[in-house]
Image (tube, rainbow, N blue to C red):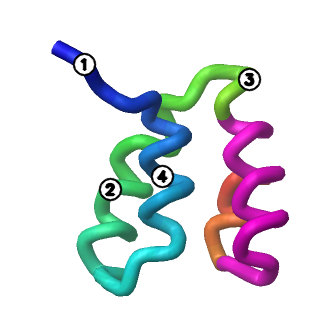
Amino acid sequence: MPYLCPEVTLLYKASSSDELRNASDFETAAPLLDGNARPWLRRSIKQAHPGHPWIRRLS
């Protein structure tokens, strides 16, 4: 079954207007990101959505 990497999915969700659902997905998936995915997601959100609250959470 095809699927997107969790970090890519979270990047898309960072720009979505459904904040409650996306926050829940972030809380579930972020702790499971491996060593490369976490810094990639942080850099990507920082570039695409400066000031987004998830940036601090991914530090």
Q: Amino acid at mark 2?
A: Asp
Q: Nearer the viewer, residue 16 or 20?
A: 16
The image shows residue 17, relative to residue 27, as above or below, that is below
Residue 25 location, quadrant = bottom left
- Is the C-beta separation of discs 4 and 2 under 8 Å? yes
For disc 1, the neighbor class at 10 Å (few under 14, some 14 to 19, many from 20) is few
Residue 17 location, quadrant = bottom left
Mark identifier at residue 32: none
The image shows residue 28, relative to residue 22, as above or below, that is above
- Badge 1 or badge 4: first in the primary sequence: 1
Q: Amino acid at mark 4?
A: Leu
Q: Amino acid at mark 1?
A: Pro
In-image side of 8 versus 42 (left or right): left
Q: Nearer the viewer, mark 2 or mark 1?
A: 1
Tag 4 residue: 10
Residue that protrudes farthest toward the front in the picture: 2
For disc 4, the neighbor class at 10 Å (few under 14, some 14 to 19, many from 20) is many
For the image, the number of numbered tags is 4
Percent of width and height locating residue 13: 43, 63
Q: Nearer the viewer, residue 19 or 1?
A: 1
Q: Nearer the viewer, mark 4 or mark 2?
A: 4
Task: Give the Cα distance between marks 3 and 4.
Answer: 14 Å
Q: Amino acid at mark 3?
A: Asn
Magenta range is: 38-52
The image shows residue 32, relative to residue 44, as above or below, that is above
- Badge 3 or badge 1: first in the primary sequence: 1
Task: Give the Cα distance between marks 3 and 1.
Answer: 21 Å
Tag 2 residue: 25
- Badge 2 or badge 1: first in the primary sequence: 1
